[in-house]
Every structure is written in C-alpha cells, then in structure tokens.
C-alpha cells in the first residue's frame, strides 16, 4: 500500500472516531505527500456515510429494545466481543 493511501486511511479513522488532534496531524501530512482537497473531501463523504448508517442502525436497535421491554442480560464470555458487553457486535 502506498504512503498516500495509508495517510488517507488514517484521516478517515480520525474522522470516524472524532479525534481532532489526529486530524491536525494527518491532514497536513496527507497534503504534503500529495492528497488534494478533492481526495480529503471524498474521504469525509465516505466516512460520513458509514457514521450516519451506524448511528441510524444503533437508534433503530435502541427503539426496538425499548419497545420489546427486554429485561434479560446478555452474558458474554471473555474475549468474545469488543468489550461493550453485548456479545453480538463483533462475533
């Protein structure tokens, strides 16, 4: 993978997690090695789509949970998920 692609991935990751200090570092570095404003805008547009979809899915899931009246807890064994406790997000 070339350096510009790696840097654009790091920009995308920084946008996804909302890390402004990471953006402050990686955006100028990406520009330094050849990223155009159009490249950076494309990264932002792609990440926004993913974040929006994930947020909408989480909201829909929450609504379903609230409506269902669920009272049971999910029991998760160590190492079986991302650590959030749900056991279903990373299986």
Image (cartoon, rainbow, N blue to C red):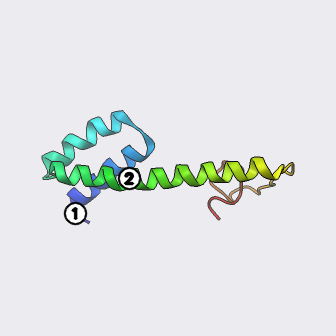
Viewer-nearest of labels 1 and 2? 2
**In percent of the image, x 68 and y 60: which residue is there?**
88
Farthest residue, direction right: 71
Residue 29 lies, with reference to residue 82, above or below; the image says above
Q: Is residue 64 visible?
A: yes
* Left-right relation of 11 to 81: left
According to the picture, the residue beneath numbered tag 2 turns out to be 47
According to the picture, the residue beneath numbered tag 1 turns out to be 2
Residue 74 lies, with reference to residue 17, above or below; the image says below
**In percent of the image, x 81 and y 53: which residue is there?**
68
Q: Quadrant of residue 77?
A: bottom right
* Left-right relation of 25 to 80: left
Q: Quadrant of the C terminus?
A: bottom right
Whole-percent x, y for residue 40 in the image: 23, 50
Q: Quadrant of the N terminus?
A: bottom left
Whole-percent x, y for residue 14 in the image: 37, 44
| Marker count (numbered) | 2
Whole-percent x, y for residue 42 in the image: 26, 55
């Amino acid at each position: 993978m070339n350096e510009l692609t790696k840097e654009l991935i790091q920009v995308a990751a920084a946008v996804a997690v909302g890390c402004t200090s990471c953006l402050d570092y990686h955006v100028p570095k990406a520009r330094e090695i050849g990223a155009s404003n159009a490249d950076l805008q494309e990264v932002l547009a792609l990440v926004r789509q993913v974040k929006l979809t994930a947020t909408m899915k989480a909201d829909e899931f929450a609504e379903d949970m609230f409506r269902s009246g669920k009272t049971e807890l999910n029991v998760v064994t160590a190492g079986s998920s991302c650590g959030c406790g749900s056991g279903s997000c990373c299986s």
